[in-house]
């Protein structure tokens, strides 16, 4: 029972960092800053690991400061990994739904909801607009060909 209580800090640190990173991603839209999320998570983990080591040492599975730093950093990086697991599962779920006969455009929009192109327009919508424009051109060509055949 004592071992279970000792590792309480690890999932708590991971959950706190996951929440902070989610808020960070909502506020910061520039790709330049989003690239540093794993580094930011590791640094936050180190800080929270040190706080946990000194504030509540009975909940931190660390015998010294160096171990607390490593536990905190790994907890922070675990938050990044948890986010990627969620994203990959959601992406695969959407692909499976499309292949099972779901509405392709609706599923594509859900999968790429947060992705933006350089104009700030949702890429799923932009791609769908391009597809619709091509479809409309093809329909116009077919109608013109049918008119020519009828004449």
Image (cartoon, helix red, strand yellow):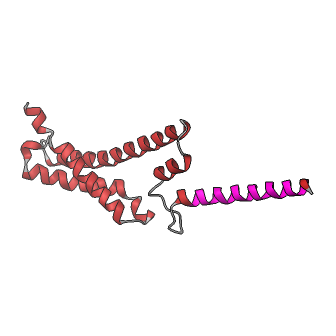
Toward the front, the furthest residue is 150
Give the residue at the far top of this rendering: 1
Residue at 7% x, 52% y is 55
The answer to whether residue 121 is left or right of residue 18 is: right
Is residue 140 within the magenta segment?
Answer: yes
Q: Position of residue 122 (x, y in %)?
A: 50, 61
Residue at image point 35% right, 62% down: 26
Q: Does the magenta-highlighted stretch encompass residue 32?
A: no
Which stretch did the figure color magenta?
126-149
Q: Position of residue 148 (x, y in %)?
A: 89, 57
Residue 69 is left or right of residue 35, and the answer is left
Query: At x 38% / y 59%, what residue is drawn?
Result: 36
Q: Main secondary structure of the magenta part?
A: helix
Towards the viewer: 70 or 38: 38
Quadrant in which the C terminus appears: bottom right
Q: x, y (%) of residue 66? A: 19, 47
Q: Residue at x 54, y 69 (%)?
A: 119
From this viewpoint, is residue 12 visible? yes
């Amino acid at each position: 029972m004592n071992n279970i209580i000792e590792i309480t800090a690890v999932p708590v640190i991971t959950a706190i960092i996951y929440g902070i990173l989610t808020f960070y991603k909502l506020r910061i839209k520039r790709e330049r800053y989003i690239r540093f999320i794993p580094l930011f998570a590791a640094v936050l983990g180190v800080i929270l690991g040190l706080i946990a080591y000194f504030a509540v040492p009975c909940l931190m599975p660390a015998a010294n400061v160096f171990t607390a730093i490593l536990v905190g950093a790994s907890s922070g990086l675990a938050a990044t990994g948890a986010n990627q697991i969620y994203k990959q599962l959601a992406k695969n779920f959407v692909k499976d739904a499309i292949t099972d006969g779901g509405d392709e455009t609706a599923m594509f929009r859900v999968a790429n909801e947060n992705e933006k192109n350089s104009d700030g327009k949702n890429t799923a919508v932009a791609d769908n607009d391009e597809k619709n424009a091509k479809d409309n051109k093809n329909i116009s060509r077919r109608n013109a060909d049918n008119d020519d055949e009828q004449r």
